[in-house]
Amino acid sequence: MTDTLFAQLGGTYTQTGDYLLPDLSLPAEKDNRPIGIWGQRRLRHLKQYHKAIYYNLLTSGKLHSHLADVEEQAQDLFYRLVKEYAEKEGITEQLKSTDQMKWVGKMSAIRNAATEIINRELIYT
């Protein structure tokens, strides 16, 4: 058998039955930052709608770091938006102590709005 380019470049094969299959492995990622809900949403979106980007990131060993970056950006943006909207709407700790149900309703609406912005700008782009 003549050497293939893969074999010439140092690649090895494993025989399985009558076939020689190349020994392939993905590059190891050194990034061990946690992936939270935002990163998981981004991963699901890439797998479902942007397969080429997903496989490029996966095979280059950059998928985990991309997801961790999205996670950090989304968390920072979420906390900043919630804080800004709460200040803009006049939601204070005093309101929380006097009318808890009103505070919960307003904060829930603010968190939902911030989530929609993050989904639109970071996750589903």
Image (cartoon, rainbow, N blue to C red):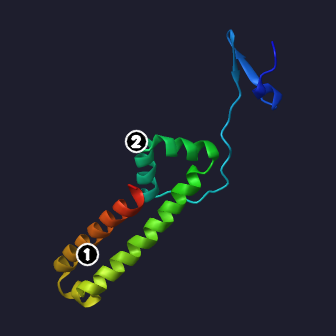
Q: Which circle marks residue 107 in the picture?
A: 1
- Where is residue 30 drawn, in percent x and y? 67, 54
When the figure is inspected, residue 55 is found, relative to residue 100, above or below; the finding is: above
- Where is residue 20 drawn, in percent x and y? 71, 17
Q: Residue at x 29, y 82 (%)?
A: 86
Q: Nearer the viewer, mark 1 or mark 2?
A: 2
Q: Is residue 47 left or right of residue 92?
A: right
Find numbered disc 1 in the image and state the secondary structure of the residue it sits on.
helix
Q: Quadrant of the N terminus?
A: top right
Q: Which circle marks residue 48 in the picture?
A: 2
Question: How many tags in the picture?
Answer: 2
Q: Is residue 96 left or right of residue 21?
A: left
Within 10 Å of disc 2 (Cα), the crowding (few <14, some 14-19, many 20+) is few
Q: Residue at x 42, y 46 (%)?
A: 44
- Where is residue 45 drawn, in percent x and y? 40, 48
| Residue found at the very far top of the displayed protein | 18
